[in-house]
Structures are given as structure tokens and as C-alpha cells.
Image (cartoon, grey):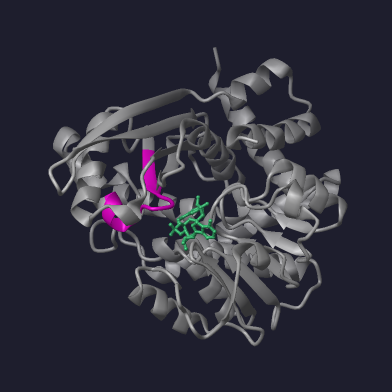
């Protein structure tokens, strides 16, 4: 199943609960604008390479459209469209004044130099600069992009439109960024994992956790949960999985990854397992925090974790979601679980527009408050309407977008 089809399925389930008319559904799910561009670049060896980039603006009823930029070989229009619509519901669930967008370039960043990456990014901005802006569409980091890429975007945009740091978030702290943005998504995943375990009456101290993905989201989630006295027994990245029954020493693994191209390849302090085996471990919480579509109807029945928290976007496909739901597994959906990143992006954008600096304590406090409120609202909706947490979160998000769209006038 293609990613946008999967997102639409989740949307339709919530729309059924809300009793939305068919024509209104079509309006809400259809992206507002989609752009595909060619990015011709000269590589370090002098050869010409033509890459394809995308930006999809899904909905702007609640504010400027907001969403990350993904650099990954499998990026295509359907995936970007799906991720853009998830951003619309995500920003609405956490109730920040944004719509949803997403972008990406089909490229393997491990195979290009830093200089090439900069040229590719600047060329991409040359193609999309008229579409983005602090009041219209604000990119941010996602898979394969980081604070450096965001700094290049700000600088390149400046060449066309003048100084405006609010055009992009996730920038380096020393370059108009905000403390706490880099950790925000993982911190949010960790925080909401603890909240969910608490609500379910399960112990958090010593809870056994498996995390797929050891990039931005995975590492910060692991760090936060280890500091909260959970036991992170397994982590993984594109080189495979690493298991230690007594708990992975997260700080040590992180140091190792930093020294080895951000990968755990050949890490000796844990047993080797595959990424598939990691998903099927007998743990208290499973956190897929790498790529989409990893839990399917084929492996859903093999998942033993009673609680699943979606750190990544779209890791569980609808068929698998049904299986897990029927088996009584509790799943915290991506549009709530990983919303910490966009929440702190909002603080960064607000800071940029006010030229007022926030400190880390304030960022963390406001993040915790925003996510806790969204969690409680989703939990309440789920109990009151007797629906899964995913459907409840979609209902909250869709309802907020639908109200804003109606109040603003659609046609
Ligand atoms: P990243 O590029 O920093 O890290 C991705 C990690 O996944 C790496 O450790 C990589 O080795 C691993 N990986 C790649 N392919 C894999 C595979 N087939 N099996 C197992 N691991 C694999 O990316 P990130 O920013 O941490 O994003 C991870 C997920 O979280 C994505 O789905 C992204 O959309 C989502 N997300 C990210 C943010 C953010 O602020 N960065 C916010 C919300 C959602």
C-alpha cells in the first residue's frame, strides 16, 4: 500500500466517526498545491547530475503550512503527499497555528559530500523560494537533513527575499535556532511514552524498551527514556539491530555512533539481531523511529510488545493497525507521538519573529505542556468515543481543521 493511501484510510476512519460529508472529505484530504522540480547539480568530480525534488502544501486553514524536508533515495511524490497531510493533522492535534506541508529530494546523503549537499540544497531553494516563506510555508529537518541544511536554506532564501530567519526552523542554535529543537522530537516521544504507561497503570522504572532507528529521533528517545530509568534493551539503524538484556548503555552507543558516521556498525557491547527481530522482541514498549511501513499485516501478529509508540511517520500500515488493535495492543500514533519537533519548531519561529531569545528550560516546559494537553485530549476522545488513540487523534486534528476551514470560508 502506498503511503498516501494508508494516510487516507486513517483519515476516513476518523471522518466516519465525525460524520463528515463526502464532498468535505475530498476537500480536506486533497493537497492544496504540489510542486515537482528538477535540480541539476555539478558534482565534485565535474559530472552533471539531475535530481528530483518535491514540495507539497496540504492545507493552510489553521496557519502557514509547516513540514520537514526529507533527503532519502525512496522519496517520491506519493510519500511527500502523505507526509504533508500528516503534518496538517499533527499541527492541529497539538493545537499550534499551522497548516501542513512536506518536501524532499530523492537522494542518498551518505553518497554525497558536504559541499555537494550544500549545492543541492541551494539549487532546490532556487526552485522553491517563491513557494516558501515565513507566512506561507516553513520547512524543517526530517530524515537525511539537519541544522546545517536549514542554515543553507535560510541563507539562500535571504538572497531572493532579504533577511528572514522565520522561513525555516531547526537551524543551528548559534544561527537563529532555538535550544532544545534537536532533542525535541525524541524528548516528546519519550515523554509521551511515560505518560501512556502511567495512564495504563504500568510501571515506567525498568520498563523494557526497543527502539528502531538511531538517528535524531531514536537517539534522543533512547537518551530520555534511559534517564527516566527505563531499560533500553535494543536499538537499531540501517546496519541492523543491537540487543542487550541488561540494557544498552545509551551514552556509550551514542558516542560510538558519533565516531562512526552516525552508525552502530560493528558495535561490540551488544548482541547482533536483525531489524525484523527487533520489532518482534518481547518488550514492554516498541518504538519504531526510523522509516515508514515497517509493521505490515505480515509481521503484525509477531509483534509481542503490548505498547507501540510511533516515533517515525507512518511505521504501521492500516492492515497491521487493525491486527494490533484487535489483539488489544495500545498504539500511540505518529501525529501525536512525534509532534514534539514541530512544536519546538513553532517556538523557534515565534522567537525569530519576535527577536526574543528563549532558554532551554522554557522550551522544555512549554513543550511538555503542549504535548501533555494534546495527550490528555486524545486520551479523553478515545475513551469517550470508544475508538483507538489513532482514530481519536485524527478526529481531534480533522475537527480543528474543518472548523477553521468553515469559519474562514472555503469557496
Ligand atoms: P535520521 O536520518 O536522523 O535517522 C534515521 C535512522 O533510521 C538512522 O539511524 C538510520 O540508520 C535508520 N534507518 C534507516 N533505514 C533503516 C531501516 N531500513 N531499518 C532500520 N533503521 C533504518 O531521521 P530522523 O530525523 O530520526 O527521522 C526518523 C523518523 O522520524 C522519520 O520517519 C521522520 O519522518 C520522523 N520524524 C522526524 C522528526 C525530526 O524532528 N527529525 C520529527 C517528526 C518525525
Report the number of numbered marks. 0
Quadrant into which the C terminus falls? top right
Relative to the observer, which residue lies in front, 195 or 258?
A: 258
Relative to the observer, which residue lies in front, 37 or 20?
A: 37
Q: Residue 216 in magenta?
A: no
Can the viewer see residue 18?
yes
**Residue 306 picture location, percent across and down:** 79, 65
Q: Residue at x 44, y 66 (%)?
A: 362
**Residue 364 picture location, percent across and down:** 48, 67
Quadrant into which the N terminus falls? top right
Relative to the observer, which residue lies in front, 269 or 186?
A: 269
Q: Residue at x 71, y 34 (%)?
A: 9
From what the image shows, is residue 217 above or below residue 115?
Answer: below
Can the viewer see residue 171?
no
- Residue found at the very far top of the displayed protein: 411
**Residue 62 picture location, percent across and down:** 52, 34
User: Which of the 4 image quarters holds residue 370?
Assistant: bottom right
**Residue 251 picture location, percent across and down:** 46, 82
From what the image shows, is residue 237 above or below residue 44?
Answer: below
- Magenta region: which residues? 138-150
Q: Residue at x 45, y 73 (%)?
A: 264
Q: Is residue 259 left or right of residue 193?
A: left
Amino acid at each position: 500500500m502506498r503511503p498516501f493511501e494508508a494516510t487516507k484510510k486513517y483519515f476516513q476512519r476518523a471522518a466516519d466517526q465525525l460524520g463528515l460529508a463526502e464532498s468535505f472529505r475530498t476537500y480536506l484530504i486533497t493537497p492544496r498545491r504540489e510542486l515537482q522540480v528538477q535540480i541539476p547539480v555539478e558534482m565534485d568530480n565535474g559530472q552533471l547530475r539531475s535530481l528530483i525534488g518535491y514540495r507539497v502544501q496540504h492545507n493552510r486553514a489553521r496557519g502557514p503550512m509547516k513540514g520537514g524536508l526529507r533527503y532519502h533515495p525512496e522519496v517520491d511524490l506519493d510519500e511527500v503527499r502523505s507526509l504533508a497531510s500528516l503534518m496538517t493533522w499533527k499541527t492541529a492535534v497539538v493545537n499550534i497555528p499551522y497548516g501542513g506541508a512536506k518536501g524532499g529530494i530523492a537522494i542518498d546523503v551518505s553518497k554525497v559530500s558536504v559541499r555537494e549537499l550544500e549545492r543541492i540544497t541551494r539549487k532546490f531553494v532556487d526552485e522553491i523560494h517563491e513557494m516558501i516563506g515565513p507566512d506561507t510555508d516553513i520547512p524543517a529537518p526530517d530524515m537525511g537533513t539537519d541544522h546545517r541544511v536549514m542554515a543553507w536554506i535560510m541563507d539562500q532564501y535571504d538572497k531572493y527575499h532579504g533577511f528572514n530567519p522565520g522561513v525555516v526552523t531547526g537551524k543551528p542554535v548559534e544561527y537563529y535556532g532555538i535550544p532544545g529543537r534537536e532533542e525535541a522530537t525524541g524528548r516528546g516521544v519519550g515523554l509521551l511514552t511515560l505518560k501512556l504507561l502511567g495512564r495504563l497503570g504500568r510501571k515506567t522504572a525498568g520498563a523494557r524498551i526497543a527502539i528502531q532507528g538511531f538517528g535524531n529521533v531514536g537517539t534522543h528517545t533512547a537518551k530520555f527514556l534511559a534517564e527516566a530509568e527505563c531499560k533500553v534493551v535494543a536499538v537499531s539503524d540501517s546496519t541492523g539491530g543491537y540487543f542487550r538484556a541488561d540494557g544498552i548503555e545509551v551514552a556509550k552507543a551514542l558516542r560510538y555512533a558519533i565516531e562512526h558516521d552516525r552508525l552502530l556498525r560493528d558495535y561490540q557491547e551488544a548482541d547482533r539481531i536483525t531489524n525484523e527481530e527487533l520489532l518482534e522482541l518481547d518488550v514492554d514498549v516498541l518504538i519504531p523511529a526510523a522509516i515508514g511501513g515497517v509493521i505490515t499485516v505480515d509481521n503484525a501478529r509477531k509483534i509481542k510488545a503490548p505498547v507501540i509508540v510511533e516515533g517515525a511517520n507512518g511505521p504501521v500500515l492500516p492492515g497491521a493497525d487493525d491486527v494490533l488493535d484487535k489483539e488489544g495492543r495500545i498504539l500511540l500514533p505518529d501525529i501525536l507521538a512525534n509532534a514534539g519537533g514541530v512544536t519546538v519548531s513553532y517556538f523557534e519561529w515565534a522567537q525569530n519573529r519576535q527577536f526574543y531569545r528563549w532558554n532551554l528550560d522554557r522550551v522544555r516546559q512549554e513543550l511538555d505542556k503542549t504535548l501533555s494537553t494534546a495527550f490528555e485530549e486524545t486520551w479523553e476522545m478515545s475513551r469517550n468515543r470508544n475508538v483507538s488513540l489513532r482514530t481519536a487523534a485524527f478526529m481531534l486534528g480533522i475537527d480543528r481543521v474543518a472548523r477553521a476551514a468553515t469559519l474562514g470560508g472555503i469557496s
